Every structure is written in C-alpha cells, then in structure tokens.
Image (cartoon, helix red, strand yellow):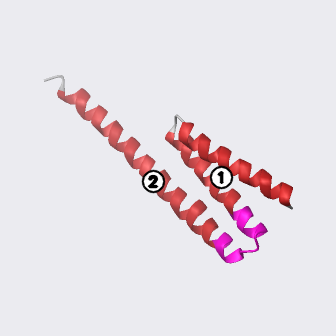
Amino acid sequence: MEALMTVLLVILILNAVMVVLAKDMMTACVIFMAQSLVMVIVWILLESPDLAITEAAVGAGVSSLLFFLALKNIRDAGEGEKNEGSTGSGD
C-alpha cells in the first residue's frame, strides 16, 4: 500500500513539473486533468470517497472544461485578429 502511495505521489510531482514545462497550453491542460485523476486515486486510497468524488467532479471535470473553453476562446480571438489585420492592410 505504501509503495503504491509513493508511486502516486511521485507521479503527482512529475505531473506538476510537466505542466510548468509544457510548451503547448492544450498539453498542459491534459496533464492537469491527469493530475486530478491521480488525486482521485490518492483520495480513494486514503479512504475519503467524498473528497474523491469532489476532486473528480471539480478538478478533472469542471476545471478542465473551463480550461478547454478558455483555450478555444483565446485561439478564436487570435484568429480573428489575424483576419482583421490582413483585410485592413490592402487599403
């Protein structure tokens, strides 16, 4: 049991470092979601099912969804600026 917990904690630390070092924001969001899922397993092993359910719903569910929607809006805004810049330079 302690060996599994140690492995999970090492995975959590590696995920945190990988999120910081990720060059692509989408990759960072996916790694963040994986970290939340690992935390769900940790909470289950610590016999806290209420925290595991909350982590799954909020950490892996709602937060990840909000991150993905924010990235989509950022990319859409960036494409809109590129299109506006190209049409206005011809005048």
The picture places residue 65, in percent across and down from the top left corner, at 51, 58
Instruction: Please report whichever mark, 2 or 1, sits nearer to the chain's N-terminal start.
Output: 1
Q: Nearer the viewer, residue 63 or 47?
A: 47
The picture places residue 39, in percent across and down from the top left corner, at 68, 60
- What's the CA distance linking mark 2 and mark 1? 18 Å
In the picture provided, is 32 more to the left or to the right than 79?
A: right
The residue sitting at 69% across, 64% down in the picture is 40
The magenta segment: 40-53
From the image, tell me which residue sits under label 1.
34
The residue sitting at 79% across, 58% down in the picture is 5
> For residue 28, what is the image quadrant?
top right
> For residue 77, what is the image quadrant?
top left
The picture places residue 24, in percent across and down from the top left corner, at 52, 37
The residue sitting at 29% across, 33% down in the picture is 83
- Residue extending farthest bottom: 50
Main secondary structure of the magenta stretch: helix
Q: Nearer the viewer, residue 35 or 89?
A: 35
What kind of residue is marked 1?
Ala
In the picture provided, is 82 more to the left or to the right than 66?
A: left
Q: Residues within 10 Å of mark 1 (few under 14, many from 20)?
A: some
The picture places residue 41, in percent across and down from the top left corner, at 74, 63
Indicate yes or no whether the magenta region holds residue 84: no
From the image, tell me which residue sits under label 2.
69
Q: Quadrant of the N terminus?
A: bottom right
Q: Which mark is residue 75?
A: none
Secondary structure at badge 1 equals helix
Query: Given contact means CB atoms under 8 Å apart, are the residues at marks 2 and 1 in contact?
Result: no
